[in-house]
């Protein structure tokens, strides 16, 4: 107070003045028509922005990791698994499922790729690359100050528009037109490790799926690929792969001396009981000290097994399939000896998971107890026998001329090593998924980046007619779609900017099928080159990528629950 009086100022109470300012502000804000200045509105927390940027960066890193494996000239990835096993693949879903991804937003991209694998089976790399490009577009729109909810809503509209545009540009396909189906499958196989064998694998994949569609493939709505069984056999080359119109087991028959290895007009019994001496439920030991008692035990065991074998013979079965057992031996030397004497071929260790497939193919019924074995429960085949595979001395059991009431087929895959075999298996599965996609949605569209460029061009035209935020977002979405042709050109060693500009020009002139011909390094009409793919693959990729991106956009906080 002394200091204030010296300076000639009146002393003030600072606490009261602060309270006064607060009250004044409160009353002013209550007045009608008051608009607060920007400093007093609820500012979005900066954390939300940081979390969003962090999510976008993490997800883009995943997309960048597999971007080089897109297209027919894409690179393969060599993965070393924790078990020390090595895996070579350029299938997006396989690569991502083996990657150890820690960031939650990046995990969403991995799941997106797996969803595409389930839905369409092909385009698993495209969907992740597309999601990465859309996230890149989002970061540009966010930096302009557009609200994430607005971007998400516009992206959904853009995806819907793209789906409709592509459907108009697609060509219908008839399921009886085998040639078109083979061309679509060859496009899918062109980017795989086994692309040089596509002339053999494409017809094989098409026939394996058409075989399970029944006599009228045009009436089918969906197809269950579990009805096609893949049997891998090491040895030979991929060219030795064949489609077996019956059943193949990946091991030879189990036979003792004198047992048959070939049976004509086979009657097949699938047994689920054990051809061995019975055991008690509890684990116990019987101590036998007398030789006479020991002989009696062995004689009874022999009698018991012989009795079972006689019942099998009586039912008329001359081929017996024995299911694997974990409780006790499914068979023993004695039972094999008796069955061989009776002229019955035995195949052991049938997996529990294969029982349903075997029953569908042979038309037999699994028998849980020897007393319920009857002639009507047997399946039939014209010929059953061991076949020695060329290129390796390995034997397999082949069932030919089966009744096949459940419409199934078996693909016997061959390969010089385990890596090639595994990749061939994945490639044939992808090829079958392409045929399944065509069964679900019977439209074909041009490949080679043609579909994405067409959608991008038409979406740009739509953006010019639209007003407001949608116009900005549509344009960003259209730019993002061009990442597919750009990456295809880049991976093929072409000049991406030149190629994409030429491609845009061709589409603007009305060539819907114009795409990148990576073999010649120029723009060609993809329909003439037979580079075609199912419409479902492209539309599903666009929808899934958009959904994932919008989900990442709407996240504004990361809560770690300990």
Image (tube, rainbow, N blue to C red):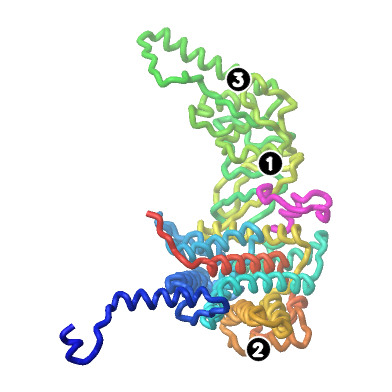
Give the vertical position of 107 relative to 448 (above or below). Answer: above
Label drawn at residue 399: 1
Choose top left, top right, bottom left or bottom right for residue 482: bottom right
> Measured from the top left, where is residue 99 in percent x and y?
46, 62
Q: Nearer the viewer, residue 530 or 47?
A: 47
- Disc 3 is placed on an element classified as helix
Give the vertical position of 354 relative to 431 (above or below). Answer: above
> Measured from the top left, where is residue 160 in percent x and y?
70, 70
Where's the C terminus, which quadrant? bottom left
Main secondary structure found in the magenta portion:
helix
Residue where numbered disc 3 is placed? 308
Residue lying furthest bottom: 7
Q: Nearer the viewer, residue 277 or 183?
A: 183
Separation (CA) of disc 2 from disc 3: 77 Å
Q: Earlier in the sequence, mark 2 or mark 3?
A: 3
**529 sits left or right of 287 in the view:** right
Point out the frontmost of discs 2 and 3.
2
Separation (CA) of disc 2 from disc 1: 56 Å
- For the point 62% across and 33% down, the residue is 321
> Measured from the top left, where is residue 428 in percent x and y?
64, 59
Residue 210 is one of the magenta-drawn residues: yes
- For the point 36% across and 13% down, the residue is 287
Please state the extent of the stretch shown in magenta in the rendering: 204-228
Q: Residues within 10 Å of mark 1 (few under 14, many from 20)?
A: many
**489 sits left or right of 17 in the view:** right
**246 sits left or right of 132 in the view:** right
């Amino acid at each position: 107070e002394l200091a204030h009086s010296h300076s000639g100022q009146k002393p003030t109470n600072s606490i009261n003045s602060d309270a006064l300012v607060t009250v004044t502000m409160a009353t002013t804000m209550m007045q009608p028509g008051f608009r607060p200045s920007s400093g007093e509105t609820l500012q979005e927390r900066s954390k939300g922005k940081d979390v969003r940027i962090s999510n976008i960066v993490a997800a883009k890193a995943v997309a960048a990791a597999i971007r080089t494996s897109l297209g027919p000239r894409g690179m393969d990835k060599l993965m070393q698994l924790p078990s020390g096993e090595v895996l070579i693949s350029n299938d997006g879903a396989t690569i991502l499922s083996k990657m150890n991804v820690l960031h939650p937003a990046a995990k969403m991209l991995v799941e997106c790729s797996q969803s595409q694998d389930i839905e369409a089976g092909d385009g698993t790399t495209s969907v992740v690359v597309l999601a990465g490009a859309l996230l890149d577009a989002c970061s540009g729109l966010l930096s302009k100050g557009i609200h994430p909810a607005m971007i998400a809503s516009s992206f959904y509209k853009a995806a819907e528009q793209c789906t409709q545009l592509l459907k108009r540009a697609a060509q219908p396909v008839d399921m009886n037109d085998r040639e078109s189906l083979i061309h679509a499958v060859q496009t899918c196989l062109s980017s795989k490790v086994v692309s040089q064998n596509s002339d053999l694998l494409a017809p094989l994949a098409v026939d394996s799926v058409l075989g399970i569609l029944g006599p009228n493939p045009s009436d089918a709505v969906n197809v269950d690929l579990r009805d096609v069984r893949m049997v891998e056999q090491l040895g030979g080359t991929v060219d030795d792969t064949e489609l077996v119109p019956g059943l193949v087991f990946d091991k030879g028959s189990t036979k003792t001396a004198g047992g048959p290895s070939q049976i004509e007009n086979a009657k097949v019994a699938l047994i689920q009981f054990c051809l061995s001496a019975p055991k008690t439920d509890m684990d116990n030991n019987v101590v036998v000290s007398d030789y006479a008692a020991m002989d009696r035990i062995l004689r009874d065991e022999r009698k018991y097994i012989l009795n079972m074998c006689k019942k099998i013979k009586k039912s008329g079965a001359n081929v017996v399939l024995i299911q694997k057992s974990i409780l006790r031996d499914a068979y023993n030397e004695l039972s094999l000896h008796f069955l061989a004497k009776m002229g019955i071929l035995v195949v052991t260790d049938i997996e529990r998971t294969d029982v349903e497939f075997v029953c569908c193919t042979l038309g037999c019924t699994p028998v849980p107890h020897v007393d319920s074995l009857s002639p009507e429960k047997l399946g039939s085949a014209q010929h059953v026998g061991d076949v020695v595979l060329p290129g390796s001395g390995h034997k397999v059991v082949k069932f030919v001329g089966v009744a096949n009431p459940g419409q199934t087929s078996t693909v016997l895959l061959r390969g010089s090593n385990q890596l090639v075999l595994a990749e061939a298996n994945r490639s044939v599965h992808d090829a079958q998924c392409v045929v399944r996609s065509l069964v679900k949605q019977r439209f074909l569209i041009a490949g080679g980046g043609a579909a994405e460029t067409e959608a991008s061009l038409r979406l740009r035209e739509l953006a010019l007619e639209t007003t407001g935020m949608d116009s900005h977002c549509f344009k960003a979405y259209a730019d993002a779609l061009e990442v597919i042709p750009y990456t295809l050109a880049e991976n093929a060693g072409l000049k991406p900017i030149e190629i994409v500009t030429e491609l845009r020009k061709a589409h603007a002139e009305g060539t819907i099928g114009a795409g990148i011909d990576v073999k010649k390094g120029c723009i060609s009409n993809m329909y003439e080159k037979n580079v075609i793919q199912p419409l479902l693959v492209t539309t599903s990729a666009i929808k899934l990528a958009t959904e994932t991106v919008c989900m990442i956009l709407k996240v504004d906080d990361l809560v770690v629950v300990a």
